[in-house]
Each structure stands twice: as C-alpha cells, then as structure tokens.
Amino acid sequence: MGNIYIALVHWPVYNREGETVATSVTPLDLHDIGRIALTYGVAGYYVTNPYESQRRLVEEIIYHWREGIGGEHSPQRQRALSGAKVVATAEAAFDDVAALEGVEPFVAATTARRMPGALPTRELADAAGGRPVLLLFGTGYGLTEDLLLAADAALEPIAGRGDFNHLPVRAAVAIYLDRIFNGNVRSETEE
C-alpha cells in the first residue's frame, strides 16, 4: 500500500434527520486529528468544507498554531497541524493527492452503517494495489450514500460490544489508522 492520506469531510454528510447538509468545523477535531495523523505518519491531512467562511476559519486556526503565537507556546500542536490542508470538497483532496503522487489514490470511505460488500480493514492494502489511499471520514451523521458509493470501497464499520454506534470522528480516525498500520485484532472465531 502506498502513502495514506485522510480527509475530514464536512459535506456531503447527513444530519440527524437524514438530510444532506454541510456541518460546521469543530476546532477539537482539527487539533486531535492533526495529532493522530502525525502519530501514525500519514502523508497528508485534508479538512474539507464547501463554505468559504468555514475554510477561512480553519485556515486562521491552523495559522495560529503553525505560524502564530500558538505555535510558540505549543510546538507539539504546531507540528501536529503542519500537514493540514484546507479544501472545499473531497474531490479537491482527491485531485491534490493525485497531483502529489502522480497516480489516482484508492478512495476508502468510512461509515458506521453496515453496507453489503464493505471491505475489511485488513484487506485494504491488497485492494489498493500499491496506490496511495485517501481515507474519507464524515462528520455529522456520516457520509452520504452517494459519496460512499463513489468511493473505491467502503470500509467495514467499527463495531463495539454494545448496540450504540456513533463514535466521535476523531476516535474513528484513531481506530481505523491503528487497524491499518498495526493490523486487526482477530476474534477467536476467525482463527
């Protein structure tokens, strides 16, 4: 598998009523996902939002920590946000990765919903076939069906022991990256 890139997608996603919306940026997600991305050595981290005002807000937050006073006080946060890029759409992230890598990335979408034919995380490297991978993480109530179907694959959802399945996106990023880089925990039934 080639380099791994991640995109925090704010549109198109669902709200709690199942409507397609654009969600607002959450500063905690920006910081925490930047730290997770740095920890796992991802090649790039994209924050997507269709609204110019939201993209400008993200750029101001990133500037504060990368080049402003925040970076002087917290060099670790400066480093964590050093690889973040702000773009309007997941397609723009895809185009940027393709330009950087010289080949189109394999797009793997994440979802909490069960989907027929979902790709187990342990099979991602084989499915990507050496291409870079762009992982899409939805905000709100998850990526829309159209975006999931447009991806090369939807990854199997993270399943806990309970019947609740609505993780914070930053937790999902950490879990998926850990599974990708450190392998999956297999149950006794799989052995």
Image: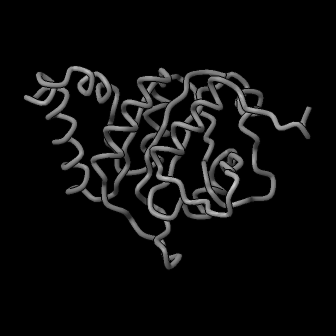
- Residue 127 in sight in this render: no
Q: Nearer the viewer, residue 61 or 85?
A: 61
- Which residue is painted at 32% across and 42% down in the image? 30
Q: Is residue 35 above or below residue 13?
A: above
Query: Percent position (x, y) of residue 88?
Result: 35, 50
The quarter in which the N terminus is drawn is top right
Q: Is residue 67 left or right of residue 149?
A: left
- Residue 169 in sight in this render: yes
Q: Nearer the viewer, residue 51 or 136?
A: 136
Q: Is residue 101 above or below residue 31?
A: above
Query: Among all residues in the image, which is located at the extreme left?
Result: 69
Residue 76: quarter of image = top left
Tag count in the figure? Answer: 0
- Which residue is painted at 71% across and 33% down in the image? 124
The quarter in which the C terminus is drawn is top right
Q: Is residue 8 above or below residue 37?
A: below
Query: Percent position (x, y) of residue 9?
Result: 44, 51
Q: Nearer the viewer, residue 37 or 151?
A: 37
Q: Is residue 190 above or below residue 160?
A: above
- Which residue is painted at 71% across and 37% down in the image? 121
Q: How is the image coloured?
A: one colour
Q: Nearer the viewer, residue 55 or 164?
A: 164
Query: Percent position (x, y) of residue 112?
Result: 62, 57
Q: Is residue 191 left or right of residue 90?
A: right
Query: Percent position (x, y) of residue 24?
Result: 31, 60
- Which residue is painted at 12% across and 24% down in the image? 73
Query: Among all residues in the image, which is located at the extreme bottom?
Result: 17
